[in-house]
Image (cartoon, rainbow, N blue to C red):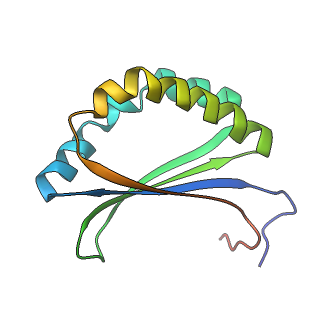
Amino acid sequence: MSKSNETVFLNSLFMDFATEPELELFLKSLHEIWTEDLYSRLSVAGLIRHVVTKVWNKDQYRVSMIFEYESKEAFQICEQILAKEFGETIKEKTSKFVFKIYNNRGVVVSEFAR
């Protein structure tokens, strides 16, 4: 069931950690990585929503992140902002963690919302 006729662009990724303590340390460090300043710039550029979840139904230590953008153009601008941040600041802050990232990008084709 479609909620609206608007096309929403999503980026979803999984981050797999080697150990649970490493995953927990990462979660405690989120505020250092995803700062109010970064969210402010991404919001102006068209980021609608960013959700971080701790996956509990797998036999591994996984975090899921969902990014929702208002348009393809917003996604592209935010991607540039994040590339700059990850290339500089965030890369330094995440270098202490060992994880694998699996990235998926898509367009919403069907949605149910309450």
Q: Residue at x 26, y 33 (%)?
A: 95
Q: Is residue 80 shown above or below 110?
A: above
Please report the residue visible at 30 percent of the width from the left and 77 percent of the height from the top: 57
Q: Is residue 10 left or right of residue 94?
A: right
The residue drawn where x is 81% and y is 57% is 7
Return the x and y of residue 63 as percentages of the image width and height.
Answer: 34, 57
Task: Find residue 64 and report its horizontal and vertical position in percent.
Answer: 41, 58
Q: Looking at the picture, does residue 75 appear above or below residue 87?
A: below
Q: Is residue 71 visible?
A: no
Q: Quadrant of the C terminus?
A: bottom right
Residue 113 in sight in this render: yes
- Locate residue 44 relative to residue 93 in the image: left or right: right
* Along the viewing direction, whichever of 9 and 94 lies nearer the viewer: 94
Q: Nearer the viewer, residue 51 or 9?
A: 9
Q: Residue 89 occupies which quadrant of the picture?
A: top left
Indicate the quadrant where residue 88 lies: top left
Q: Position of residue 43 (x, y in %)?
A: 63, 32
In this view, the residue in front, 68 or 87, is 87
